[in-house]
Image (tube, helix red, strand yellow):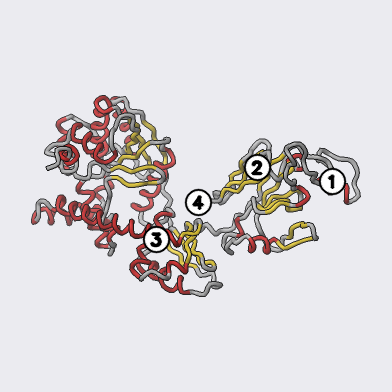
Amino acid sequence: MNPTAPPARAGAVAPQALSAAWLGERLELLIGPLRGVRLCLAYSGGLDSSVLLDVLAALRGTRGLRLRALHVNHHLQPQAQAWARAAAQRARRLRVPFERLDAPVARTAGESLEAAARAARYAALAAHLQPSELLVTAHHQEDQLETLLLALLRGAGVRGLAAMSPVASWRGTRLLRPLLPVSRAQLERYAREHALEWSEDPSNLDERFDRNYLRRRVLPLLRARWPAVAATVSRSAAHLGEARGVLEQLARVQLAPARDGAALRVSVLRRLRGPERRNALRHWIGECGLVPPDHRRLHEIAGPLLRSRADASAVVRWRGGELHRHGDRLFAQRAGATEVPSLSCIWDWRREPWLELPDGSALGLMREPHGDVCLSALPARLQVDFRRGGERLHVSAGHAPLKDLLRSEGLAPWERPSVPLIGDGARIIAVADLWLDPAYRLGRPRGGQHEEPCEGREGREGREGREGPRGGPGTGQRCAQRGRFRWRRSEG
């Protein structure tokens, strides 16, 4: 036996009794040395997370890690405020920094309360993680059993049946579940031995929820017949996790030649066999941060959507996401991202170099020595609008339709309405960072000594019969202030 293996293996199996020493080995097995590591615990105040908080707090001195706790209040129960206060007191006694997050639950049509609360909770946690923090949750062995059985009842594939990974990439950081080998009985024993207090959520008794029904009605029968069911099913989940890893690696290899910026090349995807194609698409959709489509829609994407005519602008939608085909490219985005922004914005660009737009994108105007925008030609306040149809651009030869520019830039039809139009009065002077009105455009600096002349607002007005500059550079005047528009597109 390799003499270096036992310490790592010690944390990989269920402990005889939960302890700080075991958890330290477990965490080092998952993420390496702990000194200086910043952990943030999702702390509900229930039994599981209260035990994990206590054990992690004990590890700070021996392993040198840093710990913080976040409590999410959904306001679903009358006792929610009291639970938050109790959680804060327990964290304070352990000298663990604590923050309460308010995350009301908004359900969409057909969405379960469980799913909506889970989405709101993880969104709140992600928004409040600090740089380089890892999120830790207190999921344990029975949680893994319930998750796998529910996935089986939904007809999930390998990814779903692999259930929860002990460590996973998540929203730019890592999500740790170090207690997956630990049973609830071991958590209860630890809590009794250390005289811990915790809050009980009465909704855990409500058998209308699938997980509660499974926990209260089905699992007791399984345990009576097969006492080790949680441990053995967890092993199956681990085997399926290995298979999932192999499939993900295959997907990455097969996606590589298909990648085209944020899109995939349809012609490359069509060369894959059906199962490989669906595996690659499923992986890519997950990379895009979208909930995977159901079995029927995945087959629709891998089949009819990819076989559709290149000029058909085909689309497949599901709850949480949508895929669009445009020519030989396939695009993924969150559901509703194609809605046209309806609000106009006034942008004081000198005070706000970046303007956040309604669709989650942002528009910037950066001072750059080699930029093409003559800043002194711009009004102090710009108007930002979105396409309504029929817009025309001022070009050197007269006018040109905006739609022709957007088409020539390769923007798909559903992307075009969200392109910001920057105006000086009624005139469009820039289209995001894609096009700039020649009257406001500067040529390249020549040897760093002279600037190319720009006409600007005042020069244009003077040419139209008005005299006297009002702050702009004027026709043929030199512009010493250069900048560049930047458009940071929405991740959706």
Label 4 crowding class (10 Å Cα cut-off): few <14, some 14-19, many 20+?
A: few
Crowding around mark 2 (Cα neighbors within 10 Å: few <14, some 14 to 19, many 20+) is some
The relative height of residue 396 versus residue 130 in the rendered view (above or below) is below
Secondary structure category for the residue under label 2: strand
Percent position of residue 455, x then y: 81, 46
Name the residue that disc number 1 marks.
Answer: 459
Give the amino acid at mark 2.
Leu
Q: Is residue 459 visible?
A: yes
Tag nearer the camera, 3 or 2: 2
Q: Residue at x 19, y 44 (%)?
A: 181
Mark 4 is on which residue type?
Answer: Glu
Type of amino acid at the residue the image marks with label 3: Gly
Report x, y in % for residue 394.
77, 56
* Residue that badge 3 annotates: 110
Residue closer to the observer: 12 or 143 = 12
SS for dot 1: helix
174 on left or right of 314 = left
